[in-house]
Amino acid sequence: MTKKVVTITLNPALDLTGSLDTLNQGSVSLVREGSLHAAGKGVNVAQVLSDLGAEVTVTGFLGQENQDVFCQLFETIGAKDEFIRVAGATRINVKLVESSGDVSDINFPGVEVSSEAIAAFEKTLFRLAGDHEYFVLAGSLPKGVSPQQCAGWIKQLHQLGKKVLFDSSRDALAAGLDAHPWLIKPNDEELSHFVGQTLSTVSECQSAASELASRQIENIVVSMGADGVMWLHNNEWLHAKPPRMEVISTVGAGDTLVAGLCWGHMQEMKKQELLTFATALSALAVTQVGVGVPDRNELATLQQKIQLQPYSPQASN
């Protein structure tokens, strides 16, 4: 069983998260408490994987001007830092978490990445491919990196026999789907955008995701919030549904799910155990602010409460 994994965050961010009662659009909103921390989907995945016991290497593009918070995090979680430094400052994203659990994201553009930085990243990536099997590529793309370039990296890693877990959206997701990622994890909103229509039921999400199987993607996972997680593998669907959770913040829950899926595969868990583990990990993530693995005993208790069943559209009606 392997413990080594590379997480790729091409467009990281400093997350400025504020908790407030209600967001007053067009007026003044008072924040009760706030935090500024290193983030980005791949960085969040790295943090959870490290908590689970993985040996994590992190790479991507990082602005030179405000890298200290990231460097501190990587040192704290014991991650090997292989980020390519670029001119400018890494973007700051604002996340406003209301007491109802609703989250408003205000995402700023990232740094501009030069062709020289891209060449340095490619050299790093394929050096790491020499002794790593698992790669998690998560998040949006910075200016200077096209969806086609991103898909090209996925395809090259696939051709080298690497397992790429790909979690992105919009144009990057659309391009990457044809590059043979080993696992994708769209949520219902991302899947809706991809197919061009609103998917409002489990059955509709299942139908849309099934169409992606023809693209030779080995694992298709769809996260649907309180409706749980569906996983298509070897033409078989499994549906895992957690009990109702007290939602504090949904920020990072999807990244936590990706980390759980990756760790479960790395540890060669059986299929049912793997899905209940990853679903429980993600469900617990909504009960806290920030990412990280909560109490292991609490995780094990919740895992026993996950409802798991083979899924078919008929079974859901």
Image: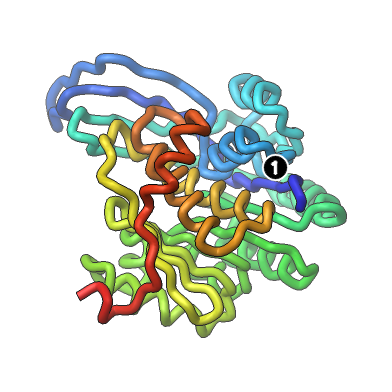
The residue carrying mark 1 is 59
The residue at the point 45 percent across, 21 percent down is 36
Residue type beneath disc 1: Thr
Q: Is residue 106 at least partly visible in the picture?
A: no
Of 27 and 101, nearer the camera is 101
Q: Mark 1: few, some, or many residues within 10 Å (few <14, many ≥20)?
A: many
Left or right side of 261 for 100: left
Q: Quadrant of residue 25?
A: top left
Specify the farthest residue to the bottom: 214
Q: Quadrant of the C terminus?
A: bottom left
Answer above or below: position of 289 versus 58.
above
* Residue 147 in the image, given as x and y percentages of width and height: 56, 63
Left or right side of 76 for 214: left
* Residue 168 in the image, given as x and y percentages of width and height: 49, 56
Of 278 and 173, nearer the camera is 278
Answer above or below: position of 255 versus 130.
above
The residue at the point 17 percent across, 29 percent down is 23
Left or right side of 137 for 249: left
Q: Quadrant of residue 247?
A: top left
Of 17 and 284, nearer the camera is 284
